[in-house]
Image (cartoon, coloured by chain):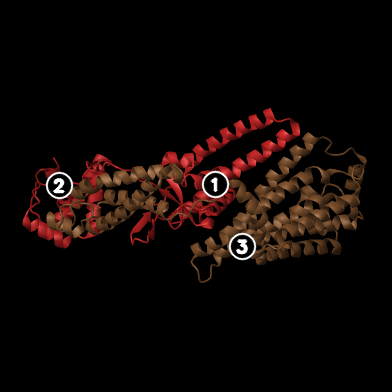
Amino acid sequence: VSETSPDTHSAAAARTRRPSAVGGMDVGRFVRERGRRWARFEALLRDVERLPDHEMGATRLLELVRLYRQTCSDLNEARSGTANAELLGRLNGLAGRGYRIVYRRSLGRRLLDEARRFVAVGAPAAFRRERASVLAAAAAFLLGAALGFGAVVASPDNGARLVPPQFHTESPKDRVERIERSEERVDSLDEASAFSAFLFTHNIRVSFLAFSLGALTLVGGAWILFYNGVIFGAVTAAYVLDGVSLFFFAWVGPHGALELPAIVFGGAAGLCLGRALLLPGSQSVGASLRRALPSVWRMLVATALVLIVAGFVEGSLSQMSAKTVPYPLKIAVAALLFAGLIFWLFGRRLGPEEEEA
Amino acid sequence: VRAAHPRVILTPEHVEIRLEPAGLGSRFIALIVDLILVTALTGMVSQVTRGVLPGAVGIVAQALALLVLTWGYHVYFEVRHQGQSPGKRIVGIRVVDGRGLPLSLEQSFVRNVVRVLDALPVGYALGAIVCQLDPHRRRLGDIAADTLVVRERHGQAYERRSTGARAFNSLRTPRVLRLVRHRVGLEEREFLATLCLRADGMEDKARFDLMEEVGRHYKERLGIEDPHMSGENLVRGLAGVLFAEQAAGRAGR
Protein backbone atom coordinates (compact mmCIF):
# COMPACT_ATOMS: atom_id res chain seq x y z
CA VAL A 1 0.00 0.00 0.00
CA SER A 2 1.44 3.27 -1.04
CA GLU A 3 1.33 6.00 1.56
CA THR A 4 2.39 8.62 -0.95
CA SER A 5 -0.77 8.66 -3.05
CA PRO A 6 -3.64 9.15 -0.65
CA ASP A 7 -5.95 10.21 -3.52
CA THR A 8 -5.92 6.95 -5.37
CA HIS A 9 -6.04 4.32 -2.69
CA SER A 10 -8.86 1.88 -2.87
CA ALA A 11 -11.36 0.76 -0.29
CA ALA A 12 -9.37 -2.38 0.19
CA ALA A 13 -6.22 -0.41 0.86
CA ALA A 14 -8.01 1.75 3.38
CA ARG A 15 -9.24 -1.34 5.14
CA THR A 16 -5.83 -2.93 5.25
CA ARG A 17 -4.28 0.10 6.82
CA ARG A 18 -6.85 0.51 9.53
CA PRO A 19 -9.03 -2.53 10.02
CA SER A 20 -12.41 -1.20 10.98
CA ALA A 21 -14.68 -2.71 13.51
CA VAL A 22 -17.06 -4.65 11.31
CA GLY A 23 -15.55 -4.87 7.86
CA GLY A 24 -17.25 -1.68 6.69
CA MET A 25 -15.21 1.44 6.06
CA ASP A 26 -13.79 3.95 8.45
CA VAL A 27 -16.13 6.82 7.66
CA GLY A 28 -14.38 9.46 9.71
CA ARG A 29 -11.07 8.74 8.06
CA PHE A 30 -12.61 8.58 4.63
CA VAL A 31 -14.18 12.01 5.11
CA ARG A 32 -11.02 13.52 6.55
CA GLU A 33 -8.90 12.30 3.67
CA ARG A 34 -11.23 13.23 0.83
CA GLY A 35 -13.24 16.07 2.34
CA ARG A 36 -11.03 18.83 0.98
CA ARG A 37 -11.30 17.42 -2.51
CA TRP A 38 -15.10 17.42 -2.29
CA ALA A 39 -15.10 20.96 -0.99
CA ARG A 40 -12.93 22.05 -3.92
CA PHE A 41 -15.24 20.21 -6.33
CA GLU A 42 -18.25 21.95 -4.82
CA ALA A 43 -16.61 25.35 -5.16
CA LEU A 44 -15.82 24.66 -8.82
CA LEU A 45 -19.39 23.49 -9.41
CA ARG A 46 -20.73 26.72 -7.95
CA ASP A 47 -18.52 28.69 -10.35
CA VAL A 48 -19.26 26.66 -13.45
CA GLU A 49 -22.99 26.88 -12.82
CA ARG A 50 -22.72 30.64 -12.72
CA LEU A 51 -20.03 31.57 -15.22
CA PRO A 52 -19.79 31.04 -18.99
CA ASP A 53 -17.19 28.47 -20.06
CA HIS A 54 -14.67 30.98 -21.39
CA GLU A 55 -14.49 32.68 -18.01
CA MET A 56 -13.94 29.37 -16.28
CA GLY A 57 -10.86 28.67 -18.35
CA ALA A 58 -9.57 25.33 -19.57
CA THR A 59 -7.51 24.54 -16.49
CA ARG A 60 -10.35 24.84 -14.06
CA LEU A 61 -12.71 22.92 -16.37
CA LEU A 62 -10.26 20.06 -16.63
CA GLU A 63 -9.82 20.09 -12.89
CA LEU A 64 -13.58 19.90 -12.56
CA VAL A 65 -13.78 16.85 -14.81
CA ARG A 66 -10.99 15.15 -12.86
CA LEU A 67 -12.68 15.90 -9.54
CA TYR A 68 -15.97 14.65 -10.96
CA ARG A 69 -14.46 11.27 -11.81
CA GLN A 70 -12.78 11.03 -8.41
CA THR A 71 -16.03 11.89 -6.65
CA CYS A 72 -17.81 9.19 -8.67
CA SER A 73 -15.29 6.66 -7.54
CA ASP A 74 -15.56 7.92 -3.95
CA LEU A 75 -19.32 7.47 -4.19
CA ASN A 76 -18.97 3.89 -5.40
CA GLU A 77 -16.48 3.17 -2.69
CA ALA A 78 -18.68 4.70 -0.02
CA ARG A 79 -21.69 2.77 -1.25
CA SER A 80 -19.94 -0.53 -0.91
CA GLY A 81 -18.50 0.27 2.49
CA THR A 82 -21.07 2.23 4.44
CA ALA A 83 -24.72 3.07 4.72
CA ASN A 84 -24.12 6.47 6.27
CA ALA A 85 -27.03 8.35 4.73
CA GLU A 86 -25.51 11.80 5.05
CA LEU A 87 -22.20 10.88 3.48
CA LEU A 88 -23.87 9.03 0.63
CA GLY A 89 -26.36 11.85 0.18
CA ARG A 90 -23.64 14.45 -0.06
CA LEU A 91 -21.55 12.46 -2.53
CA ASN A 92 -24.63 11.57 -4.54
CA GLY A 93 -25.57 15.25 -4.75
CA LEU A 94 -22.08 16.30 -5.82
CA ALA A 95 -21.81 13.54 -8.43
CA GLY A 96 -25.26 14.46 -9.79
CA ARG A 97 -24.33 18.12 -10.18
CA GLY A 98 -21.04 17.18 -11.82
CA TYR A 99 -22.72 14.77 -14.19
CA ARG A 100 -24.98 17.58 -15.41
CA ILE A 101 -21.99 19.75 -16.20
CA VAL A 102 -19.65 17.13 -17.64
CA TYR A 103 -22.20 15.56 -19.98
CA ARG A 104 -24.16 18.63 -21.04
CA ARG A 105 -24.52 19.63 -24.65
CA SER A 106 -22.63 22.67 -25.76
CA LEU A 107 -24.78 25.77 -25.52
CA GLY A 108 -26.42 27.19 -28.63
CA ARG A 109 -25.41 29.91 -31.01
CA ARG A 110 -26.23 33.57 -30.68
CA LEU A 111 -29.86 34.53 -30.30
CA LEU A 112 -30.12 36.40 -33.59
CA ASP A 113 -28.60 33.55 -35.59
CA GLU A 114 -30.95 31.15 -33.90
CA ALA A 115 -33.96 33.29 -34.76
CA ARG A 116 -32.96 33.59 -38.40
CA ARG A 117 -32.40 29.85 -38.67
CA PHE A 118 -35.69 29.17 -36.96
CA VAL A 119 -37.70 31.13 -39.50
CA ALA A 120 -35.71 29.99 -42.53
CA VAL A 121 -35.28 26.32 -41.73
CA GLY A 122 -36.24 25.19 -38.23
CA ALA A 123 -39.97 25.77 -38.30
CA PRO A 124 -40.63 24.55 -41.87
CA ALA A 125 -38.51 21.44 -41.31
CA ALA A 126 -40.39 20.64 -38.11
CA PHE A 127 -43.78 20.93 -39.84
CA ARG A 128 -42.64 18.76 -42.71
CA ARG A 129 -41.24 16.09 -40.44
CA GLU A 130 -44.52 16.01 -38.52
CA ARG A 131 -46.81 16.38 -41.51
CA ALA A 132 -48.74 13.26 -40.45
CA SER A 133 -49.77 15.03 -37.23
CA VAL A 134 -50.59 18.22 -39.14
CA LEU A 135 -52.79 16.28 -41.55
CA ALA A 136 -54.49 14.41 -38.70
CA ALA A 137 -55.20 17.68 -36.89
CA ALA A 138 -56.47 19.33 -40.07
CA ALA A 139 -58.68 16.29 -40.74
CA ALA A 140 -60.20 16.48 -37.24
CA PHE A 141 -60.94 20.20 -37.70
CA LEU A 142 -62.34 19.83 -41.24
CA LEU A 143 -64.44 16.83 -40.28
CA GLY A 144 -65.96 18.90 -37.49
CA ALA A 145 -66.49 21.84 -39.86
CA ALA A 146 -68.19 19.62 -42.45
CA LEU A 147 -70.47 18.09 -39.83
CA GLY A 148 -71.33 21.48 -38.33
CA PHE A 149 -72.03 22.94 -41.75
CA GLY A 150 -74.08 19.92 -42.83
CA ALA A 151 -76.11 19.88 -39.63
CA VAL A 152 -77.12 23.54 -39.95
CA VAL A 153 -77.92 23.24 -43.66
CA ALA A 154 -80.05 20.18 -42.95
CA SER A 155 -81.97 21.97 -40.21
CA PRO A 156 -81.15 25.58 -39.23
CA ASP A 157 -82.41 24.84 -35.71
CA ASN A 158 -79.29 22.76 -35.16
CA GLY A 159 -77.32 26.00 -35.09
CA ALA A 160 -78.73 26.87 -31.69
CA ARG A 161 -77.80 23.43 -30.39
CA LEU A 162 -74.23 23.40 -31.69
CA VAL A 163 -73.04 26.93 -31.14
CA PRO A 164 -72.63 28.25 -27.60
CA PRO A 165 -75.42 30.71 -26.77
CA GLN A 166 -73.26 33.84 -26.49
CA PHE A 167 -72.65 33.70 -30.25
CA HIS A 168 -76.21 33.98 -31.51
CA THR A 169 -77.88 37.08 -30.21
CA GLU A 170 -79.32 38.16 -33.52
CA SER A 171 -79.71 36.68 -37.00
CA PRO A 172 -76.62 36.94 -39.23
CA LYS A 173 -78.47 39.19 -41.66
CA ASP A 174 -79.49 41.69 -38.96
CA ARG A 175 -75.99 41.72 -37.62
CA VAL A 176 -74.48 42.45 -41.03
CA GLU A 177 -76.95 45.30 -41.60
CA ARG A 178 -76.25 46.78 -38.19
CA ILE A 179 -72.49 46.63 -38.65
CA GLU A 180 -72.64 48.10 -42.13
CA ARG A 181 -74.94 50.93 -41.08
CA SER A 182 -73.07 51.99 -37.95
CA GLU A 183 -69.70 53.66 -37.60
CA GLU A 184 -66.51 51.60 -37.91
CA ARG A 185 -66.07 49.50 -34.80
CA VAL A 186 -62.41 50.23 -34.43
CA ASP A 187 -61.70 53.78 -35.47
CA SER A 188 -58.39 54.68 -33.89
CA LEU A 189 -54.92 53.18 -33.98
CA ASP A 190 -54.83 52.94 -30.18
CA GLU A 191 -58.04 50.97 -30.13
CA ALA A 192 -56.86 48.67 -32.91
CA SER A 193 -53.57 47.90 -31.19
CA ALA A 194 -55.18 47.35 -27.80
CA PHE A 195 -57.70 44.98 -29.34
CA SER A 196 -54.95 43.17 -31.28
CA ALA A 197 -52.85 42.80 -28.15
CA PHE A 198 -55.78 41.35 -26.27
CA LEU A 199 -56.52 38.94 -29.10
CA PHE A 200 -53.08 37.45 -29.52
CA THR A 201 -52.42 37.19 -25.80
CA HIS A 202 -55.69 35.35 -25.35
CA ASN A 203 -55.39 33.16 -28.46
CA ILE A 204 -51.88 32.03 -27.59
CA ARG A 205 -52.97 31.02 -24.10
CA VAL A 206 -55.94 29.08 -25.45
CA SER A 207 -53.97 27.31 -28.15
CA PHE A 208 -51.25 26.35 -25.65
CA LEU A 209 -53.96 24.94 -23.42
CA ALA A 210 -55.34 22.92 -26.34
CA PHE A 211 -51.81 21.74 -27.09
CA SER A 212 -51.29 20.61 -23.50
CA LEU A 213 -54.53 18.67 -23.49
CA GLY A 214 -53.54 16.92 -26.70
CA ALA A 215 -50.03 16.20 -25.45
CA LEU A 216 -51.29 14.48 -22.32
CA THR A 217 -54.49 12.81 -23.52
CA LEU A 218 -54.32 12.75 -27.33
CA VAL A 219 -58.10 12.28 -27.46
CA GLY A 220 -58.72 15.59 -25.68
CA GLY A 221 -56.65 17.45 -28.27
CA ALA A 222 -58.44 15.78 -31.17
CA TRP A 223 -61.79 16.59 -29.55
CA ILE A 224 -60.94 20.30 -29.19
CA LEU A 225 -59.97 20.48 -32.87
CA PHE A 226 -63.14 18.67 -33.88
CA TYR A 227 -65.38 20.81 -31.69
CA ASN A 228 -63.85 24.06 -32.94
CA GLY A 229 -64.50 22.76 -36.45
CA VAL A 230 -68.14 22.08 -35.62
CA ILE A 231 -68.67 25.64 -34.33
CA PHE A 232 -66.89 27.15 -37.31
CA GLY A 233 -68.91 25.03 -39.74
CA ALA A 234 -72.20 25.82 -38.05
CA VAL A 235 -71.58 29.59 -37.97
CA THR A 236 -70.46 29.58 -41.61
CA ALA A 237 -73.62 27.72 -42.58
CA ALA A 238 -75.79 30.22 -40.72
CA TYR A 239 -74.29 33.17 -42.64
CA VAL A 240 -74.39 31.34 -45.98
CA LEU A 241 -78.05 30.39 -45.48
CA ASP A 242 -78.94 33.99 -44.64
CA GLY A 243 -77.36 35.09 -47.95
CA VAL A 244 -74.53 37.15 -46.47
CA SER A 245 -71.62 34.88 -47.37
CA LEU A 246 -69.61 37.66 -49.04
CA PHE A 247 -69.69 39.68 -45.81
CA PHE A 248 -68.81 36.60 -43.76
CA PHE A 249 -65.74 35.67 -45.75
CA ALA A 250 -64.54 39.26 -45.85
CA TRP A 251 -65.13 39.58 -42.10
CA VAL A 252 -63.56 36.31 -40.94
CA GLY A 253 -61.21 35.69 -43.87
CA PRO A 254 -58.21 37.95 -43.26
CA HIS A 255 -57.47 36.74 -39.76
CA GLY A 256 -59.15 33.36 -40.15
CA ALA A 257 -56.69 32.52 -42.91
CA LEU A 258 -54.00 32.56 -40.23
CA GLU A 259 -55.92 31.80 -37.06
CA LEU A 260 -57.60 28.60 -38.18
CA PRO A 261 -54.32 27.08 -39.44
CA ALA A 262 -52.71 28.16 -36.17
CA ILE A 263 -55.36 26.26 -34.21
CA VAL A 264 -54.59 23.23 -36.37
CA PHE A 265 -50.82 23.69 -35.91
CA GLY A 266 -51.04 23.96 -32.13
CA GLY A 267 -53.33 20.93 -32.07
CA ALA A 268 -50.94 19.06 -34.36
CA ALA A 269 -48.04 19.75 -31.99
CA GLY A 270 -50.19 18.33 -29.18
CA LEU A 271 -51.02 15.20 -31.18
CA CYS A 272 -47.37 14.77 -32.06
CA LEU A 273 -46.20 14.94 -28.44
CA GLY A 274 -49.19 12.92 -27.23
CA ARG A 275 -48.30 10.15 -29.62
CA ALA A 276 -44.71 10.19 -28.36
CA LEU A 277 -45.85 10.10 -24.72
CA LEU A 278 -48.72 7.63 -24.92
CA LEU A 279 -47.73 5.44 -27.87
CA PRO A 280 -43.93 5.24 -27.67
CA GLY A 281 -43.80 1.88 -29.43
CA SER A 282 -40.59 -0.04 -28.87
CA GLN A 283 -38.67 2.96 -27.50
CA SER A 284 -38.70 4.12 -23.91
CA VAL A 285 -41.06 7.00 -23.20
CA GLY A 286 -38.10 9.30 -22.52
CA ALA A 287 -36.40 8.45 -25.82
CA SER A 288 -39.62 8.82 -27.75
CA LEU A 289 -40.33 12.22 -26.13
CA ARG A 290 -36.81 13.45 -26.87
CA ARG A 291 -37.26 12.58 -30.52
CA ALA A 292 -40.50 14.52 -30.74
CA LEU A 293 -39.62 17.55 -28.59
CA PRO A 294 -37.39 19.45 -31.08
CA SER A 295 -40.18 19.49 -33.66
CA VAL A 296 -42.90 20.11 -31.11
CA TRP A 297 -41.41 23.22 -29.59
CA ARG A 298 -40.72 24.70 -33.03
CA MET A 299 -44.32 24.05 -34.02
CA LEU A 300 -45.49 25.78 -30.86
CA VAL A 301 -43.33 28.84 -31.40
CA ALA A 302 -44.49 29.04 -35.02
CA THR A 303 -48.10 28.79 -33.82
CA ALA A 304 -47.55 31.68 -31.43
CA LEU A 305 -45.90 33.81 -34.14
CA VAL A 306 -48.76 33.16 -36.57
CA LEU A 307 -51.26 34.04 -33.85
CA ILE A 308 -49.51 37.35 -33.19
CA VAL A 309 -49.76 38.31 -36.86
CA ALA A 310 -53.37 37.06 -36.95
CA GLY A 311 -54.12 39.19 -33.90
CA PHE A 312 -52.95 42.35 -35.65
CA VAL A 313 -54.99 41.53 -38.75
CA GLU A 314 -58.08 40.74 -36.68
CA GLY A 315 -57.72 43.91 -34.65
CA SER A 316 -57.54 46.14 -37.70
CA LEU A 317 -58.35 44.96 -41.24
CA SER A 318 -60.91 42.33 -40.23
CA GLN A 319 -62.98 44.94 -38.35
CA MET A 320 -63.35 47.27 -41.33
CA SER A 321 -66.62 47.26 -43.25
CA ALA A 322 -67.17 47.92 -46.95
CA LYS A 323 -67.17 51.68 -46.26
CA THR A 324 -63.40 51.60 -45.78
CA VAL A 325 -62.14 48.52 -47.57
CA PRO A 326 -64.09 46.74 -50.34
CA TYR A 327 -64.92 43.15 -49.48
CA PRO A 328 -63.24 41.53 -52.51
CA LEU A 329 -59.99 43.21 -51.47
CA LYS A 330 -60.29 41.77 -47.94
CA ILE A 331 -60.91 38.32 -49.37
CA ALA A 332 -57.90 38.72 -51.67
CA VAL A 333 -55.74 39.63 -48.65
CA ALA A 334 -57.06 36.55 -46.86
CA ALA A 335 -56.11 34.32 -49.78
CA LEU A 336 -52.69 35.92 -49.96
CA LEU A 337 -52.01 35.45 -46.24
CA PHE A 338 -53.07 31.81 -46.36
CA ALA A 339 -50.93 31.13 -49.43
CA GLY A 340 -47.96 32.88 -47.80
CA LEU A 341 -48.30 30.81 -44.65
CA ILE A 342 -48.47 27.52 -46.53
CA PHE A 343 -45.58 28.56 -48.77
CA TRP A 344 -43.44 29.46 -45.75
CA LEU A 345 -43.96 26.12 -44.08
CA PHE A 346 -44.43 23.68 -46.91
CA GLY A 347 -43.70 25.43 -50.18
CA ARG A 348 -39.98 26.04 -50.39
CA ARG A 349 -37.11 23.68 -50.92
CA LEU A 350 -35.03 23.65 -47.77
CA GLY A 351 -32.06 21.81 -49.13
CA PRO A 352 -29.60 19.81 -47.09
CA GLU A 353 -30.07 22.07 -44.06
CA GLU A 354 -33.41 20.38 -43.45
CA GLU A 355 -31.78 17.14 -42.39
CA GLU A 356 -29.67 18.93 -39.87
CA ALA A 357 -32.44 21.03 -38.33
CA VAL B 1 -50.78 9.84 -2.44
CA ARG B 2 -47.86 7.68 -3.48
CA ALA B 3 -44.49 7.71 -1.79
CA ALA B 4 -41.73 9.60 -3.58
CA HIS B 5 -39.06 7.51 -5.25
CA PRO B 6 -35.71 8.79 -6.46
CA ARG B 7 -34.96 8.29 -10.14
CA VAL B 8 -31.73 6.31 -10.47
CA ILE B 9 -29.40 7.02 -13.37
CA LEU B 10 -26.22 5.19 -14.27
CA THR B 11 -23.35 7.40 -15.43
CA PRO B 12 -20.72 6.27 -17.94
CA GLU B 13 -18.40 5.89 -14.95
CA HIS B 14 -20.79 3.17 -13.73
CA VAL B 15 -21.89 5.16 -10.77
CA GLU B 16 -25.51 5.25 -9.75
CA ILE B 17 -26.75 8.75 -9.06
CA ARG B 18 -30.07 9.17 -7.30
CA LEU B 19 -32.23 12.13 -8.24
CA GLU B 20 -34.33 12.95 -5.19
CA PRO B 21 -37.65 14.50 -6.20
CA ALA B 22 -38.46 17.85 -4.59
CA GLY B 23 -41.58 17.98 -2.49
CA LEU B 24 -44.74 19.92 -3.20
CA GLY B 25 -44.12 22.44 -0.43
CA SER B 26 -40.73 23.67 -1.60
CA ARG B 27 -41.96 23.83 -5.19
CA PHE B 28 -44.92 25.90 -4.09
CA ILE B 29 -42.73 28.36 -2.19
CA ALA B 30 -40.46 28.65 -5.24
CA LEU B 31 -43.50 29.27 -7.40
CA ILE B 32 -44.75 32.05 -5.16
CA VAL B 33 -41.35 33.76 -5.13
CA ASP B 34 -41.21 33.56 -8.94
CA LEU B 35 -44.77 34.82 -9.18
CA ILE B 36 -43.91 37.87 -7.11
CA LEU B 37 -40.85 38.53 -9.28
CA VAL B 38 -42.80 38.15 -12.52
CA THR B 39 -45.49 40.49 -11.22
CA ALA B 40 -42.90 43.08 -10.24
CA LEU B 41 -41.16 42.76 -13.61
CA THR B 42 -44.50 43.02 -15.40
CA GLY B 43 -45.24 46.23 -13.57
CA MET B 44 -41.86 47.69 -14.42
CA VAL B 45 -42.05 46.68 -18.06
CA SER B 46 -45.52 48.19 -18.38
CA GLN B 47 -44.35 51.45 -16.82
CA VAL B 48 -41.42 51.68 -19.19
CA THR B 49 -43.17 50.72 -22.43
CA ARG B 50 -46.28 52.78 -21.82
CA GLY B 51 -44.33 55.70 -20.43
CA VAL B 52 -41.61 55.94 -23.05
CA LEU B 53 -43.33 54.91 -26.26
CA PRO B 54 -46.26 56.86 -27.71
CA GLY B 55 -49.83 55.50 -27.95
CA ALA B 56 -50.29 52.53 -30.20
CA VAL B 57 -46.60 51.60 -30.34
CA GLY B 58 -46.48 51.57 -26.55
CA ILE B 59 -49.54 49.33 -26.32
CA VAL B 60 -48.11 46.83 -28.79
CA ALA B 61 -44.64 46.89 -27.24
CA GLN B 62 -46.13 46.33 -23.81
CA ALA B 63 -48.21 43.37 -24.98
CA LEU B 64 -45.26 41.73 -26.74
CA ALA B 65 -42.94 42.32 -23.78
CA LEU B 66 -45.47 40.80 -21.40
CA LEU B 67 -45.90 37.86 -23.74
CA VAL B 68 -42.17 37.22 -23.72
CA LEU B 69 -42.05 37.64 -19.94
CA THR B 70 -44.99 35.30 -19.32
CA TRP B 71 -43.72 32.45 -21.47
CA GLY B 72 -40.01 33.19 -21.28
CA TYR B 73 -39.23 33.86 -17.61
CA HIS B 74 -38.98 30.24 -16.51
CA VAL B 75 -37.50 29.08 -19.82
CA TYR B 76 -34.71 31.63 -19.60
CA PHE B 77 -33.69 30.71 -16.08
CA GLU B 78 -34.08 26.97 -16.55
CA VAL B 79 -31.91 26.92 -19.65
CA ARG B 80 -29.36 29.59 -18.77
CA HIS B 81 -29.08 29.11 -15.02
CA GLN B 82 -28.81 25.37 -14.64
CA GLY B 83 -32.49 24.67 -14.08
CA GLN B 84 -32.94 27.24 -11.34
CA SER B 85 -35.29 30.18 -11.44
CA PRO B 86 -34.68 32.66 -8.59
CA GLY B 87 -37.46 31.05 -6.56
CA LYS B 88 -36.05 27.57 -7.04
CA ARG B 89 -32.58 28.80 -6.13
CA ILE B 90 -33.85 30.19 -2.84
CA VAL B 91 -35.46 26.93 -1.75
CA GLY B 92 -32.65 24.79 -3.18
CA ILE B 93 -34.43 22.85 -5.89
CA ARG B 94 -33.61 22.45 -9.57
CA VAL B 95 -35.24 21.31 -12.79
CA VAL B 96 -33.25 18.65 -14.63
CA ASP B 97 -33.74 16.39 -17.60
CA GLY B 98 -35.12 12.94 -16.73
CA ARG B 99 -31.69 11.44 -17.32
CA GLY B 100 -29.98 13.80 -14.89
CA LEU B 101 -28.61 16.13 -17.56
CA PRO B 102 -29.37 19.84 -17.87
CA LEU B 103 -32.73 20.30 -19.50
CA SER B 104 -32.79 21.45 -23.12
CA LEU B 105 -34.53 24.53 -24.49
CA GLU B 106 -37.31 22.45 -26.00
CA GLN B 107 -37.93 20.58 -22.75
CA SER B 108 -38.06 23.78 -20.78
CA PHE B 109 -40.39 25.40 -23.30
CA VAL B 110 -42.82 22.49 -23.36
CA ARG B 111 -42.90 22.03 -19.58
CA ASN B 112 -43.70 25.71 -19.19
CA VAL B 113 -46.35 25.71 -21.91
CA VAL B 114 -48.10 22.83 -20.16
CA ARG B 115 -48.04 25.03 -17.03
CA VAL B 116 -51.37 26.51 -18.25
CA LEU B 117 -52.94 23.08 -17.83
CA ASP B 118 -51.26 22.42 -14.48
CA ALA B 119 -52.53 25.75 -13.17
CA LEU B 120 -56.16 24.73 -13.71
CA PRO B 121 -58.71 25.16 -12.31
CA VAL B 122 -57.17 27.46 -9.73
CA GLY B 123 -53.83 27.75 -7.90
CA TYR B 124 -52.11 24.80 -9.64
CA ALA B 125 -54.66 22.37 -8.16
CA LEU B 126 -54.43 19.92 -11.06
CA GLY B 127 -50.64 20.02 -11.10
CA ALA B 128 -50.48 19.48 -7.33
CA ILE B 129 -52.77 16.45 -7.48
CA VAL B 130 -50.85 14.87 -10.36
CA CYS B 131 -47.61 15.63 -8.55
CA GLN B 132 -48.74 13.78 -5.41
CA LEU B 133 -49.83 10.76 -7.43
CA ASP B 134 -46.59 10.49 -9.38
CA PRO B 135 -43.72 8.60 -7.75
CA HIS B 136 -41.19 11.09 -9.13
CA ARG B 137 -43.34 14.07 -8.08
CA ARG B 138 -43.78 15.33 -11.63
CA ARG B 139 -46.53 17.71 -12.67
CA LEU B 140 -48.11 17.33 -16.11
CA GLY B 141 -45.52 19.61 -17.68
CA ASP B 142 -42.70 17.46 -16.30
CA ILE B 143 -44.35 14.32 -17.65
CA ALA B 144 -44.78 15.83 -21.12
CA ALA B 145 -41.17 17.03 -21.30
CA ASP B 146 -39.52 14.20 -19.32
CA THR B 147 -38.08 16.53 -16.70
CA LEU B 148 -37.76 16.27 -12.94
CA VAL B 149 -37.57 18.79 -10.15
CA VAL B 150 -34.89 17.60 -7.77
CA ARG B 151 -33.93 18.53 -4.26
CA GLU B 152 -30.40 19.72 -3.87
CA ARG B 153 -28.42 18.76 -0.80
CA HIS B 154 -26.00 21.27 0.49
CA GLY B 155 -22.79 20.33 2.18
CA GLN B 156 -23.65 19.42 5.74
CA ALA B 157 -21.42 19.29 8.74
CA TYR B 158 -22.01 15.58 9.13
CA GLU B 159 -18.51 15.02 10.45
CA ARG B 160 -19.46 16.58 13.77
CA ARG B 161 -22.91 15.09 13.83
CA SER B 162 -21.33 11.69 13.77
CA THR B 163 -23.47 8.69 14.35
CA GLY B 164 -21.87 7.56 17.52
CA ALA B 165 -18.51 9.08 18.25
CA ARG B 166 -17.92 8.42 21.91
CA ALA B 167 -14.83 7.72 23.92
CA PHE B 168 -16.08 4.60 25.69
CA ASN B 169 -18.30 2.01 24.19
CA SER B 170 -19.12 -1.06 26.22
CA LEU B 171 -20.32 -2.80 23.07
CA ARG B 172 -16.84 -2.90 21.66
CA THR B 173 -16.22 -6.46 22.75
CA PRO B 174 -15.08 -9.21 20.42
CA ARG B 175 -18.29 -11.14 20.94
CA VAL B 176 -20.58 -8.25 20.03
CA LEU B 177 -18.39 -7.26 17.12
CA ARG B 178 -18.60 -10.75 15.71
CA LEU B 179 -22.37 -10.89 16.14
CA VAL B 180 -22.83 -7.50 14.58
CA ARG B 181 -20.69 -8.43 11.63
CA HIS B 182 -22.77 -11.51 10.96
CA ARG B 183 -26.25 -10.42 11.82
CA VAL B 184 -26.66 -6.73 10.98
CA GLY B 185 -27.16 -6.19 7.26
CA LEU B 186 -26.45 -3.07 5.25
CA GLU B 187 -30.05 -1.89 5.36
CA GLU B 188 -30.18 -2.21 9.12
CA ARG B 189 -26.95 -0.26 9.39
CA GLU B 190 -28.47 2.50 7.33
CA PHE B 191 -31.52 2.42 9.56
CA LEU B 192 -29.42 2.73 12.72
CA ALA B 193 -27.37 5.58 11.28
CA THR B 194 -30.46 7.45 10.16
CA LEU B 195 -32.10 6.89 13.51
CA CYS B 196 -29.14 8.47 15.31
CA LEU B 197 -29.06 11.41 12.92
CA ARG B 198 -32.77 12.09 13.22
CA ALA B 199 -33.04 11.50 16.95
CA ASP B 200 -32.13 15.12 17.74
CA GLY B 201 -35.18 16.38 15.91
CA MET B 202 -37.66 14.07 17.62
CA GLU B 203 -40.12 14.77 20.37
CA ASP B 204 -38.74 13.49 23.68
CA LYS B 205 -41.39 10.89 24.32
CA ALA B 206 -41.39 9.59 20.76
CA ARG B 207 -37.64 9.41 20.81
CA PHE B 208 -37.56 7.49 24.08
CA ASP B 209 -40.24 5.00 22.98
CA LEU B 210 -38.63 4.39 19.60
CA MET B 211 -35.15 3.98 21.01
CA GLU B 212 -36.42 1.57 23.71
CA GLU B 213 -38.22 -0.52 21.12
CA VAL B 214 -35.24 -0.69 18.79
CA GLY B 215 -32.94 -1.30 21.76
CA ARG B 216 -35.10 -4.22 22.97
CA HIS B 217 -34.95 -5.75 19.52
CA TYR B 218 -31.19 -5.62 19.31
CA LYS B 219 -30.67 -6.76 22.91
CA GLU B 220 -32.55 -9.90 21.95
CA ARG B 221 -30.92 -10.32 18.58
CA LEU B 222 -27.41 -9.89 19.86
CA GLY B 223 -27.94 -11.46 23.27
CA ILE B 224 -26.79 -8.44 25.24
CA GLU B 225 -27.62 -8.91 28.89
CA ASP B 226 -27.29 -5.51 30.46
CA PRO B 227 -30.56 -4.41 32.12
CA HIS B 228 -29.18 -0.94 32.88
CA MET B 229 -28.32 0.04 29.32
CA SER B 230 -30.99 2.35 27.92
CA GLY B 231 -32.31 1.86 24.43
CA GLU B 232 -30.69 5.03 23.16
CA ASN B 233 -27.33 4.10 24.62
CA LEU B 234 -27.51 0.75 22.93
CA VAL B 235 -28.51 2.21 19.55
CA ARG B 236 -25.82 4.86 19.63
CA GLY B 237 -23.29 2.34 20.80
CA LEU B 238 -24.16 0.01 17.98
CA ALA B 239 -23.96 2.80 15.44
CA GLY B 240 -20.59 3.77 16.87
CA VAL B 241 -19.33 0.25 16.46
CA LEU B 242 -20.76 -0.04 12.98
CA PHE B 243 -19.20 3.06 11.61
CA ALA B 244 -15.99 2.84 13.55
CA GLU B 245 -16.20 6.47 14.40
CA GLN B 246 -14.50 5.90 17.71
CA ALA B 247 -11.10 5.14 16.26
CA ALA B 248 -11.36 7.97 13.77
CA GLY B 249 -12.49 10.37 16.43
CA ARG B 250 -9.58 9.59 18.73
CA ALA B 251 -7.05 9.74 15.93
CA GLY B 252 -8.41 13.07 14.72
CA ARG B 253 -8.22 14.90 17.99
Residue at point 62%, 46% (across, down): A112
Work out whether disc 1 and disc 2 sit on a shared chain.
Answer: yes
Q: CA distance from mark 1 to mark 2?
A: 48 Å
Task: Decide if residue A274 is on the left or right side of residue A319.
Answer: left
Residue at point 61%, 49% (across, down): A113
Residue at point 23%, 50% (across, down): B193
Mark 1 vs 2, N-terminal side: 1
Task: Give the foreground label among 1 and 3.
Answer: 1
Residue that label 1 marks:
B75
Work out whether disc 2 and disc 3 sit on a shared chain.
Answer: no
Q: Colour of chain A?
A: brown
Work out whether disc 1 and disc 3 sit on a shared chain.
Answer: no
Task: Decide if residue B92 is on the left or right side of residue A8.
Answer: right
Residue A195 at x, y = what percent? 75, 40
Residue that label 3 marks:
A272
Residue A106 at x, y = what percent? 48, 53
Q: CA distance from mark 1 to mark 3?
A: 21 Å
Q: Secondary structure at mark 3?
A: helix
Task: Decide if residue A227 is on the left or right side of residue A118.
Answer: right
Instruction: Supply the letter of whichever chain is red.
Output: B
Residue at point 67%, 50% (across, down): A304
Looking at the image, the residue that sits furthest to the bottom is A282
Q: Chain of mark 2?
A: B
